[in-house]
Image (spheres, grey):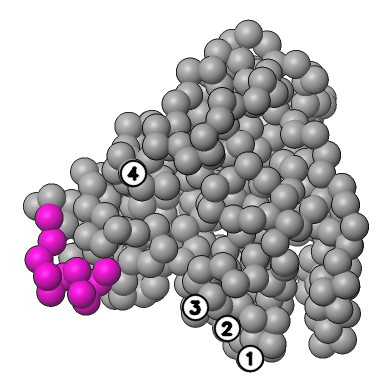
Amino acid sequence: MGAGLPSPRPDKGGAAILTPLFIGSEIYRNSSYGAWHPLRVPRVSTVMDLARALGWLDTHNYRNSPRARAAAMTVWHDPDYVAALERAEAEGAVDAGTRARFHLGTPSNPVFPEMFRRPATAVGGVLLAADLLRDGGIVYAPGGGTHHGMPDRANGFCYLNDPVLCILALRSIGAGRIAYVDIDAHHPDGVEHAFAGDGQTLLISVHEERRWPFTGAIEDNGGGNCFNLPVPAGLNDTEMTMILDRLILPRVTSFRPDALVLQCGADAVADDPMSRLSLSNRALWAVVAALRDVAPRLVVLGGGGYNPWSVGRAWTGVWATLNGHEIPSRLPMAAEGVLRGLEWRGNSRGKAPPVHWFTTLADPPSPGPVSDTLRARLAQLEGR
């Protein structure tokens, strides 16, 4: 099932990491945004359990995420906001002024017991990733990817913006040119807010049109370094292949980045309740495979994903792709048991999960026609 990768070298001491490293934490298993929030579902813990059940994750390639301190967050985030976030967790409530100023305690960004520690752990994970990648390699941190966070407020389920802090951390260890690719169903408005107009950072986003946060129009070039591709509902695997071949790969390779950050949100997969896109998880894995070796440093983050089976299976397949593992056609009993043990309370799908959500990682392919709208938008971006 493995791909015969070389033995790992030490994480530090002047040697590049030869095998990908996984950064995770048990905090994701034991925290939830609340009983009816889309992020009530387990995600990172499912990936950890599936990868271990498949023999793909153990002590040699797993690192426990530290929790970032407030000082590390205030490299980009407003100190008053970080203090308010920490205080909201400690007090378990916010007053009206805090809610209005910092957007804490809202339906999207509720008060919950780990509301500071959980995002602080995601930030700690990406800071560790940057430190591990001083001399090159690949790090997977599926707890990261909260790309909507703003400097002075929570936004769109995101209390802190770990992709922004990851890019800044990579820059601090010597990566001058950084490419950021985002294939989440939602536009990364917080990341664009941070780096629009920065010629040392390339931003590419593929996201659903007319979807919250309603930013990222194709005309929005962010001062020249942003390539926004809003796609119509129903995006299929064939169309994603065209996007990869005509937009993502050419732009990233010509940019010649010192580091690449890939936000691999799983909410573009067909079975996710928060988008109207129709990708199979194979399309996500194809992007990961294509970008795996285009830069000397690669950080892969999670992001959106609100169906516990589809996000867990998709992100476990990302880890397999990074390592060159063969995806089994039928999961072993231990891995199947992980998937059968998941629950989705408040599920609005109204039907029982299909059997393949329990027995496989790979979705059936989702090919289809390429829309005229997508062809025209790709041509528009190619002309820039």
- Residue marked by disc 4: 36
Return the residue nearer the eye: 167 or 360: 360
- For residue 277, what is the image quadrant? bottom right
Work out whether mark 4 precedes mark 3 in sequence or the reverse, and give the earlier one: 4
Mark 3 lies on residue = 194
Q: Earlier in the sequence, mark 4 or mark 2?
A: 4
SS state under label 1: loop
Region rendered in magenta: 93-103
| Residues at circles 3 and 2 in contact by the CB criterion of under 8 Å | yes
- Could you say which quadrant of the image residue 139 lies in? top right
- Residue 94 included in the magenta stretch of the image: yes
| Residues marked 1 and 2 touching at CB (< 8 Å) | yes
Q: Earlier in the sequence, mark 3 or mark 1?
A: 3
Residue carrying label 1 = 223
State the CA–CA distance, disc 1 to disc 2: 6 Å
Identify residue for label 2: 196
